[in-house]
Image: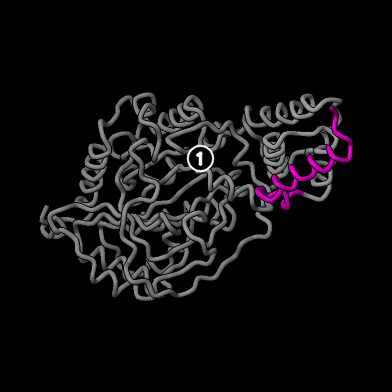
Amino acid sequence: MKLPAERIDIHHTRRLEAVIEQSEFANLDVQDQAAIRMAALKYGFTYQELKQIIVMALDFALWNEPGIREFFREKSRKAAFGSVKRAWKELKRGPKSYDDFSGSPEPLRKVKPVGIDEKSPGFGSCPVASENTRCCNLLTLDAVEGCGFDCAYCSIRTFYKSKAVGINKNFARKLQSLELDPNRIYHIGTGQASDSLMWGNKWGILDALLDFAERHPNVILELKSKSDNVKHIISREIPANVICTWSLNTDTIVENEEHLTASLSRRLAAAAALSEKGNLIGFHIHPMLHYNRWQAEYGALFARIREQFAPRDVVLISLGTLTFTKGAIREIRGRKMRSKVLQMPLVKAAKKYSYPLNIKEKMFRFAYEAFSEWCGPVFFYLCMEDTALWPRVFGYEYASNGDFEASMISHYMDKIKSRGGQSYSARLRV
């Protein structure tokens, strides 16, 4: 027996409202919201179909594509749902284009840090370390919780419940209590929970870190940044075991996806200022994005690096690309902004989501071959990528994370010792 039309409407309306409560439906413009409501009644979409339609509508809005209402002109439920999904998949399948596109968060998220009194200096393991990918076993030292930049793909937002940025006011005192084994080499980074340089020396955090490195010559301290705020750090002596590194990307990606960060030119100028002072530097070409002009624009970026810097001054170049947890994907879709980072063929990668291996291999091999003359003096590696990519990109691989870590530390220490001189080497107990 067929149900009356009004009973069907009530059933479909309740189903839609249940989906809306568990989604970011409110982030859609009012026209798309109205179109989905009308289509839900017209076609009688299933619960799972409605969930997918809302996700696809959010993606169309993120990518600045025509609204989902353009697809609800078919006669049947199957045809209507199929037309939406085909268009969505087609946009994800090919390289994205930033032509006539302007990426922007909405609203632009500018934050001021607040002082916090943490009980410890935040010393631990890399928060994204995994045995499912090749990992260097980096240790982290967090003076700051949260980032003031607003990169569309950022995962730091998922680390903390609060959107505020907190700086440990007592960081210097806390570092004094940190006990390290003098017979072990430590590789420690400060750029996993925030940007290492953007805050300058607020609450004395940079002085505390440089003094910490001076006291512990067995520590390789890496300060990773997308900032050009090097005024304080170049005003004082920098220990040889401190390596400042910059995350670099093409102008297209910086302008459209890395909001509030320093421009590419300003990052390179900041790196040059440290290099000219005699300090070791490094670069992270991460995340590489696959878009219509990726090869020409990354090629131009690599040429700028080769022209501005000498391999003897560069410790490392890492390569990596977009990798998302489910939480990070929800966070991106939950914001009212324009971004193309999710316009990609997402596949499962070590319990996360990333590009297929064939796309990664093409991009990473292109980058590595661009620096063929730097191989040897500079340590190249893939950051948190599938082990199968190493032999395809570099022609070699490590049997374990421990082997990778040992090789990295050995290379870094050789360069550090050459800069630190005999007095530095004499202080080492390992």
Is there any visible trace of residue 186 in the rendered image? yes
Residue 99: in sight, yes or no?
A: no
Q: Which residue is mark 1?
A: 322
**Residues drawn in magenta:** 1-28
Q: Quadrant of residue 293?
A: top right
Q: Is residue 2 magenta?
A: yes
Q: Residue at x 69, y 53 (%)?
A: 336
Kindly state the secondary structure of the residue where label 1 is placed.
loop
Amino acid on which the number 1 mark rests in the picture: Leu
Q: Is residue 163 magenta?
A: no
Rendered location of residue 55, percent (x, y) = 67, 40
Q: In this rendering, would 3 be left or right of 52? A: right
Tell me if residue 26 comes above or below residue 68 in the rendering. below
Image location of residue 346, percent across then percent down: 55, 33
Measuring 80% from the left and 38% from the top, which residue is drawn there?
A: 40
In the image, taking residue 363 as reference, residue 89 lies left or right, namely: right
Q: Residue furthest front?
A: 1
Residue drawn 17% across and 55% down? 421
* Of 119 and 51, the residue lying toward us: 51
Q: Position of residue 424 (x, y in %)?
A: 16, 58
